[in-house]
Amino acid sequence: MAGAASHVDLFDFKPELVRRHGEPSDFGEPVEAFQNGLGPWLRPVWPFRPHGQCGKMLSEPVADLGRVADELAFIHNLTGKTGVHSQATLLQATGFNLPGFPGMGCWVSYGLGSENENLPTFVVLPDHRGFASNGSKNWDAAFLPSHHSGTVIHPGTEAPIADLFAHRKGDFITRAGEQAAHETLAGLNGVHAAGRAGDPRLEGRIRSYELAARMQLAAPEALDISKESDGMLALYGVKRNPPAWPKEINADEERDYFGRKCLVARRLLERGVRFVQIWSGNDNGFPRRNWDSHEDIERDHGPLAMGFARGASALILDLKQRGLLDDTIILWTTEFGRMPSSQGGRGRDHNPFCFTNWLCGGGIKPGITHGESDPWGYKPADRNHPTTVYDIHATVLHLLGLDHKRLTVRNNGIDRRLTDVHGEVIAGLLS
């Protein structure tokens, strides 16, 4: 959720904020806020109520997650390293807060390889309003072979995969002619590569072009949701015909938009795509209409939260009824949380000191909460034992059968890995 979703307004219920609403905030220590958002305590914008047998407290906009509450494992004591969007986003996506490192999906692609040679191993489904901070650096392979980079797909658009097919004006291009062109290019690429042995960039580019040719047959079928039943579309909140998505955030359209990506994600996963990354909430305009709710939590978080909650819960239910949830891990994350104090009366500032992740499926213990925040949601309750993104990454790799300490690549004299020199598998999350 790009821009930083507010844990205290969605998942991490804090009665103390309700009791102290409007009182001057007192953190008991100096606080360096990103935009001086240290106004009075601000109660959760929406009411919370318990869901599932586990009784997990969820706020009104994410109530759709209540139908899968007993499948989820929440972590409320996650800490970051920075309150800057670009750095914090890179940390979540790549394990480092500087550019130049492979995305998590790239590492999984490198470690596990492909299950379907006609589709990418790592697919990225970005927000239709634009990319998050850092753009493609979040899913670039960096020093790994370049074919492990994420492939960007825009479901519901006229050309979901850029340049996969000839422009509609190229009606003179026949299938036979295109095949002949591919064969000629393959020959030329082979001759070119033979004289430049050991260049992984060239090899990666050739493999990407070859994959693109195979995708011309496989991708349209994988992305075509027209044959899904009306009941399945309704489960995800998807309309039969995709809308012309407006720039203005609208809850109904957000359900269709995010649900469509989740449905496509399921179709990709069941066809052997290893890693699918869905992004939500990018908009660089002003006032901000994304998760970066400095001005108005209710206005911006509400529709975005309703959209992702519908799509994510549908994906979990769908995977479970197909028998796919047991070997699919779902991770919900954001770059940091938001402060329990108010900013301008209706917004909240950045909070890198404490925020929430949740996971489910693939060996995750269901219906639990691991790690708590303090009574305000400001910092972990146990400041000596927080959870870090390295721990999350180590745990996900472990469940995929990969040892995060051994999945390394030598680069510039250093054995690099997703978790840098940190991270421990979170035993309490394992079923």
Image (spheres, helix red, strand yellow):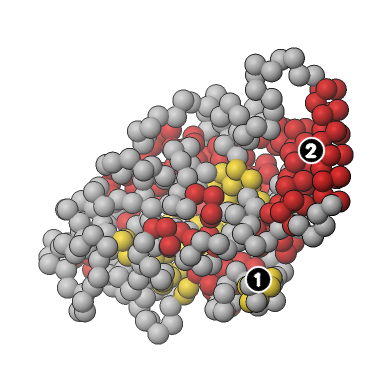
Q: Name the residue that disc number 1 marks.
A: 411
Name the residue at 31% across, 61% down.
350
Q: Nearer the viewer, residue 69 or 200?
A: 200
Q: Residues within 10 Å of mark 2 (few under 14, many from 20)?
A: some
Q: Nearer the viewer, residue 93 or 223?
A: 93
Determine whether 200 is above or below 295 in the image: below
* The quarter of the displayed image where residue 267 is located: top right
User: Could you tell me how far apart the alpha carbons at marks 2 and 1 are, in whole angstroms?
Assistant: 31 Å
* The quarter of the displayed image where residue 163 is located: top right
Q: Is residue 181 visible?
A: yes
- Residue 356 is situated, as x and y percent measured from the top left of the image, at 42, 64
Q: Secondary structure at mark 1?
A: strand
- Residue 2 is situated, as x and y percent measured from the top left of the image, at 43, 52
Name the residue at 12% across, 67% down.
24
Side of 342 where 289 appears, left or right? right
Name the residue at 82% across, 46% down.
192
Residue type at mark 2 is: Arg
Q: Residues within 10 Å of mark 1 (few under 14, many from 20)?
A: few
Q: Residue furthest left?
A: 23
Q: Name the residue that disc number 2 marks.
A: 214
Determine whether 309 is above or below 350 in the image: above
Residue type at mark 1 is: Asn
Q: Nearer the viewer, mark 2 or mark 1?
A: 1
Name the residue at 57% across, 37% down.
154
- Residue 330 is situated, as x and y percent measured from the top left of the image, at 58, 57
Q: Secondary structure at mark 2?
A: helix
Q: Is residue 315 visible?
A: no
* The quarter of the displayed image where residue 286 is located: top left
